[in-house]
Structure formats: structure tokens, C-alpha cells
Amino acid sequence: MSTAKVRMVKGPATVAVDGACHVLGSDVSGQTITVRAGKALPFEPSGRCRLRARLGRGGRMWLADPTSAGTSMWRGLAQQVLAGGKKITIMLAGDTDTGKSTLATYLANMALERRLVPCIVDGDIGQGDLAPPASIGAAALSKQVTDLRDVSASLFEFVGNTSPAGFEHLVAKKLRSILERAGPLGDICIVNTDGYVRGGGIQYKLMIAQELRPDVIVCIGENPELLDAFRNGSWQVLHTKASSQASKSGYERKSRRLDQFLRHVGSGSSAAELSRVKFTYMGRLFSPSELRIPPIVQLEPENMKGMFVGLGLNSQVVGFGIITDITPSSIYIRTDVNSFDRVYLSNIRLGRDRAIEIKIA
């Protein structure tokens, strides 16, 4: 295989690597790599290398130009932000499908290569990798990875909506909270944000930057207005090319989002007495007694059944679930969490067949 090209593989697929090869900076030589449905990974060979791909339905494999795919276009950026070897926070900002998650993975792998411990904060509440939709997750990485969905997050925050529009201040506040807790876990913190950067999204991203006060902001792709918005801050602003490997169809996005919901909910069940549980929605606390005359639609029993929720214990989000039933005395939740004292409500119900996401008006 020629080293002048990048071999892209879109899942579902498994790829057996025979020879020297890297994926997003991770050495995958001699390994078999699984590529999830809807995910595209760049295989970058060095020397003689043979790839044997088994493609599932919708999977494909193609040669790509290294100037717009793979990691060579980001090599200089990684060297620049990691050169000092000091503790820094990097914020990634860019439109949907520009490769923010891909770049976050690559930077984390390059940090590990330099024996730095990277911590990733995933603030994409619509299409995140470290947490289910409507949530924020963070994790310190101890080894290189090719897909952040293989990483188990250790910290969570719950927002309750899959779009930041109307929830901008809450998202910024939750990001700051999780960054404060995640910072001590690593040498370098990489904050990935959502793709809302058009119109009001620019001011929203500036709000996030002002909350987080990162050392470096990396703007991905062509968006002069976004670059200009960051110019007068205390941080360093860098610009880099978007990745052509990042595009996903609407169906792929929906499928990956549903997979994230169900993966974090699990298949267990748990129940709690309502008298022992408090409810939170958009940062506002509600007591069980308010269920009798609900002040918000999210507390109406018909809306709570099937609702995707966060579960808290001692003021920390410890997991997620789906409300299966609620009675005057108890609440029943599909979840792998055994103990909780708080339920974080959302605007999301999952349909009976778990295949559709229903917004609560």
C-alpha cells in the first residue's frame, strides 16, 4: 500500500492490519480494529502494510487525500499545543462535521505519546462520545484509542436537552463545573464542544470560552466570524483545517444517538420511594409533593413515562435511565444504577420500541 494515501474505512467494519499503521496517532500495527456504524477512521500506513476489511451493511473503504483526511494536516498543530509539556486547557470549536471529536482523539493520543495524561471533556450534548445525548462527560485517558466511545467516562453533568439552543447558559455552567472536577485528573484538558456556531451560536461559544478560560482555542474549518469572536480574549487562538472524513448522514446521526442513549441506560431496573427522591430540571429543584399539581410539563406523569433521565447520588450524576412507571408512592426506572436520590429530568422520551426520540413540548 502506498504511504502517500490515507485509507478511509467507514463502519460497520472490522479491519485486520498486517504491517505498520496508525489510526489517529494510535499504533494499530498487527491489530484488528472495529469501526462502528456511521464512524469513519483514517488508516495511515508506514512502510509496507496490508489492510483486510470486512464491511457490514453501509460500510465502505476508499483512498483519501492526506491533505484533507487523516492526521498529517494536524501534525503541526499538535506539536505546537503540546510542545511546552505544561498543564493546559484546549477548547475545540467548529461547525458540525468538521472533525472536532476526531481532532480531540488525535490530540489525546499525541499527548500520551509524550507521556502526558490527557483528559477529554465532551460537551457535545447532541452527538457526544463520552456521555449519552443531553449530557456532558469527561474522562482521563490512560492509553491510546481510535474511538472515544471505547472510553468509560468517570464524570458526568446532565443538561436535559439534545440542542443547546435555549439552554446556552446551562451548558456553559455545566461545562465549567465538569472542567473544574476533571482538571486535576490530567496534564492536558481537551474540551470538545457542539457544532452550534452559526447565528447565536457564535455568542454562545464565546460565553463558553469566558466560562472556561482555556489557554488555547482551536477553530476548525472556515468560519471567519467565529475566529473574530475569539480574537480579544486572554487565550491563544489557532485555526486548522476541517476533516473531510467527518460527514454523517441524518440516518447515521439518529442511529448513533439512539445507540448512545441505550448504551448508557443498560438493561437493569431500579425503584425508589418518591419521598426519598428530589427532581431537577434545568437547574431548578422540585420536591415530590409538586407532582400532585405539576408546575412544569416535565413533571406530569404521562410525560415522565418513557422519559430519559439522569440519576444522581450525593449531588453527583452517577448514571442514566428511562422512567418505566410512576405511582403516587414510587418511581420505577430502567437503569443499571442501584441507588439514587435525585432524578434529573429531560425534554426527551424514548418510544415504546426504543426506536424514536420524542421531544416534550
Image: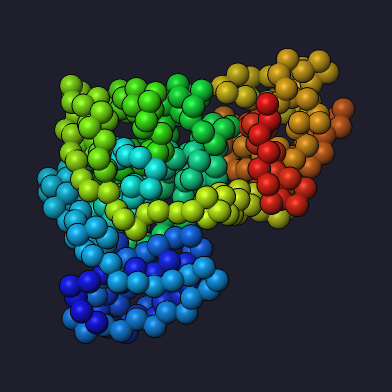
Residue at 31 percent of width and 55 percent of height: 244
Q: Does residue 108 appear left or right of residue 338 in this picture?
A: left
Residue at 42 percent of width and 79 percent of height: 53
* Rendering coords of residue 83 (x, y %): 12, 49
Residue at 33 percent of width and 47 percent of height: 98
Determine the image quadrant of residue 309. top right
* Rendering coords of residue 318 (x, y %): 58, 41
Residue at 24 percent of width and 54 percent of height: 111
Res. 332 in view: no
Q: How many labels were placed on the picture?
A: 0
Q: Does residue 169 appear left or right of residue 349 in this picture?
A: left
Q: Does residue 319 appear left or right of residue 127 in this picture?
A: right
The image's colouring method is rainbow
Q: Up-down: is 87 above or below 360? A: below
* Rendering coords of residue 68 (x, y %): 24, 57
| Nearest to the observer: residue 109 or residue 76 | 76
Q: Does residue 154 appear left or right of residue 95 in this picture?
A: right
Q: Up-down: is 148 above or below 10? A: above
Q: Up-down: is 133 above or below 116? A: above
Q: Quadrant of the N terminus?
A: bottom left
| Nearest to the observer: residue 72 or residue 223 | 223
Determine the image quadrant of residue 92. top left
Res. 235 in view: yes
Determine the image quadrant of residue 39. bottom left
Q: Quadrant of the C terminus?
A: top right
